[in-house]
Image (tube, rainbow, N blue to C red):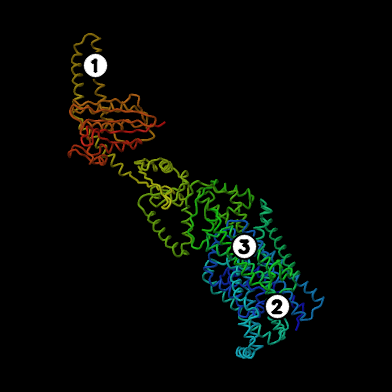
Amino acid sequence: MTLSETWVIAATAAYLLFLLGLLFVAGKFRWAKRLSQHPLTHTLALGVFASAWSLYGSSQLALEYGYGAFAYYLGTGTLFLFAPLALAPLAELCRRYQLQSLADLLVFRYHSNGAGQLATIFLALALMPLLAAQLQSLSVSYELITQGQHFNEDSLRSNDLVTLGFATFVLAISLIAANKQHYSRLPLVLAFDTIVKVFAFNAIGLLAIFSVFGGLEQLDTWLLEHPDNVALLYSPLRETSSHTLLLVFIASSLITPNLFHSAVIQQPKGNIKRILPWAFPTLLLLLALPIFPILWAGFERGVLTAPEYFALGLPASMERPSWTLIMFIAGASASATALVTILISLSTMVVNHCLLPLTGIRRGSGLSRQLKRLQQLAIVGLMVLILGLYSLWRGQHSLTEMALLSFIAGAQFVPGLIAISYWPSGNRQGFLAGLSAGAAIWLFGLALPTLFNIKSINLGYGPHLQLGLEHWDTVALLSLTINSIIFAWVSLRSQATAEEIYSAELCAENELSQPMRSSLDVFSVPDVEKRLSLALGGGPSRDAINKALQQLKIDDNERRPYALRRLRDQLEANLSGILGVNMAQDIINKHIPLRKHKSSSTDVTLMEERLAQNQNELLGLPAELNKLRLYHRQTLQELPMAVCSIGQDLEFVLWNKAMDALTRLPGKQINGSHLDELPPPWGPVIRNFYHSGDEHWANQEVQIGDIPHWISLHKAKVQTPMEGRSQGTVILLEDVTETHRLEQELMHNERLASVGRLAAGVAHEIGNPVTGIACLAQNLRYESEPEDTQDTVDQILSQTDRITRIVQSLVNFSHTGQADQSQLQNIHIHECVEEAIHLLKLHTEKPDLQFVNTVPQDAQIQGDSQRLIQVFINLLSNARDASPEDGVVTIDAEQNQQQLILRVTDQGPGISSAIMDRILEPFFTTKDPGEGTGLGLAMVFSIMEEHSGSVEIHNLGPESTPSGAQFILKFPLKP
């Protein structure tokens, strides 16, 4: 039975045009868009894996390998059955970094442009036989249903025209669907076509069972009557190749770019773990069930076609034209969809990894046109190669042989793919060496001998070396074995670069990589856009920036280094989806480079963001570590003390809630920002403290609004536990405003108490000049000479000045206040000591005690004179109390370029070692109750800290019998 060529061509064209229309409908209606995005649609779209060879060649495979024919479906089904382990890590990498092809994935993992170029070229060569098989299946099947077994030159010419027309139609569809907007709608078209293929193939299977044999029971009877057909299941024509066949199909399941794109890149997140492990193997089972019934029915009916076309010959021999046409249309659409999807995916790889590096990128609005034209050129070039190979072989090899050539070549990618997620030690050199060795063995052992019909080679010694498809199993095992050994050996013997190691850590399953913080030489979003425009032009760069900002949900006025690094990474990922990883990395690294630091530190902010985004997917040790991280982070966030952490590159890593409340600056704006960007009043304080060599600053005044606050700051270095290397600094801020005010009040009361204790001496000192004034006034009434009168008046004024000085000293001493750093003045330290001695002499206790001031009169420091007088009064008062009645208290000083050192030395019994460590504590005193508050030396210490000075205490003489105490005050000298 033959069919009308017109009807066959018209029906097939109508169906293919219907699929093209469905491609456009998928983007027009809301229901079609929702249906295109449904997980089941994406699962059915994987049916593109079942090309024309799957429908036709499976019968030939069953004849030659018996149950081994199921290896094709069992191998692929096994891979998808373990999709959570085999595919999920790859899909997550492709989703996170927008990798669009197998070559992109290899470039990203091995950090090598050469890996992408080698993979693209070899994959293109490997797929040529499989693609040529699609044209051959159409040509042969068209001949079978239109001319039957009666071929002539006219029919051959007609077949050539039909095949060429079909190839032209596929080329046109490929050029249309290559548009990304259309390509995203393909899953709906592929899902519908899968349903048609499954329906048609199973319909022929049911036709074989119920129309040829009469039912399942009759089929069992027929098998018993024909045991030779049962024997073929267990003893096929090629007995030794079934296990190798299974290995090849498991290894090469993902090498076709269309299946890789559908299974790894386009699958919705979560679909791989929830649906694919059971849905796709079920789909493969439906495609595998009719194989043997069709094969047996063909034998029973005596179908004259080759076994690989029994699915067409069977309904034709039964005079079932409708089913014959349906099966032909299913086969033609299987060829068309396989060719279109592989051409589009493969052309993208060729453009990104082969053509663009040669042509470069055209700046401006011509970028999209350049990419479109390059892809069109690649599609046309690939189609020409497919037509050339088809014309060269033209029926010399079966569909099975042509498919095996491609799948054996695809198996060479397996070692490199496994190492992506499960062997971080694999490196670029190992992958390139292994793949090159495996490709060479395939090329010289299978491809070239098949192309030129070479059966063996005489090496000049020993037996001839057998080559070609007759020995495909030996060549497949040899190439894959040598590929794996060389990959492992070279990887272990060679040194990977730091970039390779980092990429391997990113790709590793449950990876615990530590991204290193780097800095950029751009400081704003406009700077990034300006740099990017140098490569892409103004329009494309602006569009790329806006898209990345929307994805990251950040503003275009962002200046934080961390946010700019995220923008850079997002731009690289987005460009990878357009230009490929190779060109995207080159553009970003050239125009927005990372600055290298001598001492790099872990980017904790990025690590925490990644963990927060993927914490529900973590398992095992990473999940436990994440829980520990959350516990510690929450502890720091809820800590009532204000804490911030600054990295080695001066970026804020932590800013807890207490810091939010104290500074009124939200942590979301501060984390990831630079220390120099912190606004006043906190910026100068924290910045100066960070750069100082001090670990503690006490009572620093900070003006918050119109209210002064006093803050104590403490810091400590954060070191790595293993290396002991500093990774940053933790700064703790303590609000001591209330404590400071209480201390000031206590110190003021202490001064007032001191004034009270001096009252008797003051009365005596003021009484003497007042008595003198009274006597001089009485004498004045008797003076008659002007000169005597004038002399008396001068004496009165002198005594009045004396009273004024005494009163002013008391008033100054009783004033309270805090040293204001902005109002510090150059003061003569000798005069401050003299003023303190003068005030102490107002006290009548120990009148014979001498104060010897040998401080140089030209010694100057910057400070608050009244507060320094308080320091000297407290020290000299304690020295007086400790010294004997006729003792001497000495005050001397020496000066160098850095500091002024002043010593107060008494002749008392010294300070006991038991209380030496506590003597500067507030409220600690050795005096009897009521005689001292214990704030004197604490006040000295506090005022010295305000002046950035220090206090040291020593005993003179032997430790057992000291002969006095010495207080040493050190004042820094500012240049």
Local secondary structure at mark 2: helix
Q: Position of residue 425 (x, y in %)?
A: 53, 59
Quadrant housing the N terminus:
bottom right
Residue located beneath label 3 in the image = 435
Residue at numbered disc 1: 795
**Side (left or right) of 456 relative to 262:** right
User: Where does label 2 land, which residue?
Assistant: 328
Q: Are marks 2 and 3 in contact (CB under 8 Å)?
A: no
Q: Residue furthest top?
A: 785
Of all residues shown, which one is farthest toward the front? 461
Disc 2 to disc 1, C-alpha distance: 135 Å
Q: Give the quarter of the image for residue 633.
A: bottom left
Between label 2 and label 3, give the one nearer the viewer.
Answer: 3
Is 942 or 349 nearer to us in this picture? 349
Horizontal and vertical percent position of residue 831: 31, 26
Name the kind of residue labelled 1 in the image: Gln
Q: Nearer the viewer, residue 523 or 262?
A: 262
Q: How many other residues sit within 10 Å of disc 3, few (<14), some (14-19) or many (≥20)?
A: many
The disc labelled 3 sits on which kind of residue? Leu
Please name which of the two marks, 2 or 1, marks the residue nearer to the observer.
2
Residue 13, visible in the rendered structure: no
Q: Marks 3 and 1, how far apart in space?
A: 112 Å
User: Disc 2 residue type?
Assistant: Phe
Q: If you read the primary sequence from the N terminus, does the residue marked by circle 2 or circle 1 appear first?
A: 2
